[in-house]
Image (cartoon, rainbow, N blue to C red):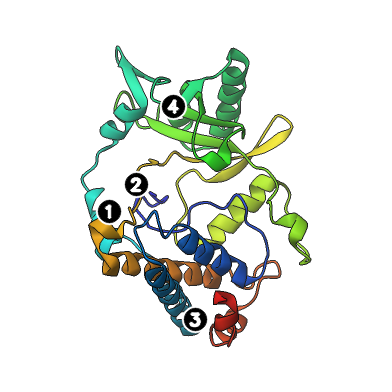
Amino acid sequence: YKGDNRLVYFDINDFDESALAPASWDLLRFLTSVLVGAESMDVKKKEAAELCDAFLDAYCSTLVSGKAGWVERETASGLIGDLLGSLQGRLRPAFLDSRTELKGKHRRLRVDNGKALPASDEARAAVTQLVGELAESRDDPRFYEVFDVARRIAGSGSLGVDRYVILVRGKGSPDGNYLLDLKAALPSSLTPYLKTPQPAWKSEAERVVEVERRMQAASPAFLQPVRFGTHTYVLRDLQPTSDRVKLDEGRAGFNAVRGVIAEMGRIVASAQLRSGGRDGSAIADALIAFGQGTWRTDLLA
């Protein structure tokens, strides 16, 4: 994703389910994904176990170092380096062309590409008013002038969740326009299973945004919680859904896949270190001690 400093990062980017929970839950979720997804990566059972070990090796060594890192184009290698390198020359007009169509000198959102549906007149007016109110507190309110609004379709986990894509003036038409993503924030699905007292967030959107800000090296542009009617939403820069590393051993080779998995281990550890000591989360010393612990065999089992 592109950060608010306009550099592109490879990092955790989905915090809808974020909560104050045991550090091992992130690891269990990831390792389970590796084992369940092994077949789709063309990875054999023994190799899947090696990937789990690579992830934990990188996670523990980063945690024990006590120093959070990050992945951007200049520091990335392997499949991640290839992905970030391929994005270097991509210009905004190409991204806009994939999501909008030109009508005269102005753009309108496309609703024929499987990524958006028409918004009702009522929803369009409400979203336009919301963005207009936000613009009043900005240095350049014209940047946020709304040109079009549509309902957004993205991700199976978000089906049924109220979500909009918003086309704004940005730096000028037609090729300086920006796309914003507005998504309803729902309670974390982890909450019913947690005994840990949770921080007193003002809203679900604040929870999502604050945890994201704390854990990422750099957050996406425009990231903020907003109130829309009786619910709270997360507003951010719309990110291309196609910018992903394709984990396919048959095409990339096992070592390349293992390199990505290890980098993900470093990313998780870095995110936990970055957010340590906030609202009851473990301080860095406790996380370092956890990285030196003897829990690994039990967790893998």
Distance from label 2 to label 4 (Cα)? 20 Å
Q: Outermost residue, left direction? A: 89
Give the amino acid type for the residue marked by disc 3 in the picture.
Gly
Near-viewer residue (133 or 166)? 166
Say which mark, if any, is on residue 167. 4
Distance from label 3 to label 2 (Cα)? 30 Å
Circles 1 and 4, Cβ within 8 Å, touching? The answer is no
- Which of the 4 image quarters holds residue 297? bottom right
User: Which residue occupies 49% across, 67% down?
Assistant: 268
Q: Name the residue tied to disc 1.
A: 83
| Mark 2 element type | loop
Task: Estimate how packed mark 1 is, as few (under 14), some (14 to 19) or many (20 or more) residues with alpha carbons within 10 Å.
Answer: some
Near-viewer residue (17 or 206)? 17
- What x and y, as percent, mark residue 54? 40, 75
Q: Name the residue tied to disc 2.
A: 243
Relative placement, left or right, of 276 versus 249 is right
Distance from label 1 to label 2 (Cα)? 7 Å
Relative placement, left or right, of 249 versus 181 is left
Task: Estimate how packed mark 2 is, as few (under 14), some (14 to 19) or many (20 or more) residues with alpha carbons within 10 Å.
Answer: few
Give the amino acid type for the residue marked by disc 2 in the picture.
Asp
Q: Name the residue tied to disc 3.
A: 66
Distance from label 1 to label 4 (Cα)? 26 Å
Of marks 2 and 4, the one in the foreground: 2
Of marks 1 and 4, the one in the foreground: 1
Of marks 3 and 2, the one in the foreground: 2
Task: Estimate how packed mark 4 is, as few (under 14), some (14 to 19) or many (20 or more) residues with alpha carbons within 10 Å.
Answer: many
Distance from label 1 to label 3 (Cα)? 28 Å
